[in-house]
Amino acid sequence: MRFHEFQPGRLLAGLILVTAGVLYLLDASGQADLPWFLVVPMAVGGLCLSAVVGMTTYAVRRDRRDVSDASGERRSSESNDR
């Protein structure tokens, strides 16, 4: 199995949609009586939250990548000068 980066935004989105699906299943089976205006905003708000988490993760990784690239360029230019 290939290694891949952990993506917390996608994990959060998946958990929220699974939770919304389980709530709808409980409502459909008669186990719970949930109004639609409870589940829909929860799903939409959760997807917005996961988008913010994903953008934050991307920004942090981009900054770390830029810092590591800059230090790598500096090292290679120092070795070329010698």
Image (cartoon, grey):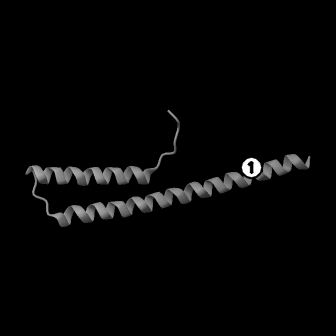
Q: Is 42 placed above or below 77 here?
A: below
- The location of residue 61, given as percent across then percent down, is 57, 54
Left or right of residue 74, residue 39 in this image: left
Residue type at mark 1? Gly
User: Is 80 situated left or right of 27 in this image?
Assistant: right
> To which quarter of the image does residue 48 belong?
bottom left
Q: Label 1 crowding class (10 Å Cα cut-off): few <14, some 14-19, many 20+?
A: few
Q: Position of residue 23 (x, y in %)?
A: 19, 53
Q: Is residue 9 left or right of residue 79?
A: left
Image point (46%, 49%), residue name: 7
Q: Residue at 53%, 57% (x, y): give it.
A: 58
Q: Is residue 2 above or below residue 39?
A: above
> x, y (%) of residue 82?
92, 46
To which residue does mark 1 refer? 72
Residue 44's place in the image compared with 26, above or below, is below
> Which percent across, then down, holds residue 1?
50, 32
Residue at x-position 73% and y-position 52%? 71
Q: How many marks?
A: 1
Q: Residue at x 42, y 61 (%)?
A: 51
Is 32 placed left or right of 58 in the picture?
A: left
* Residue positioned most to the left: 30
Q: Pick out the residue farthest to the right.
A: 82
Callout 1: helix, strand or loop?
Answer: helix
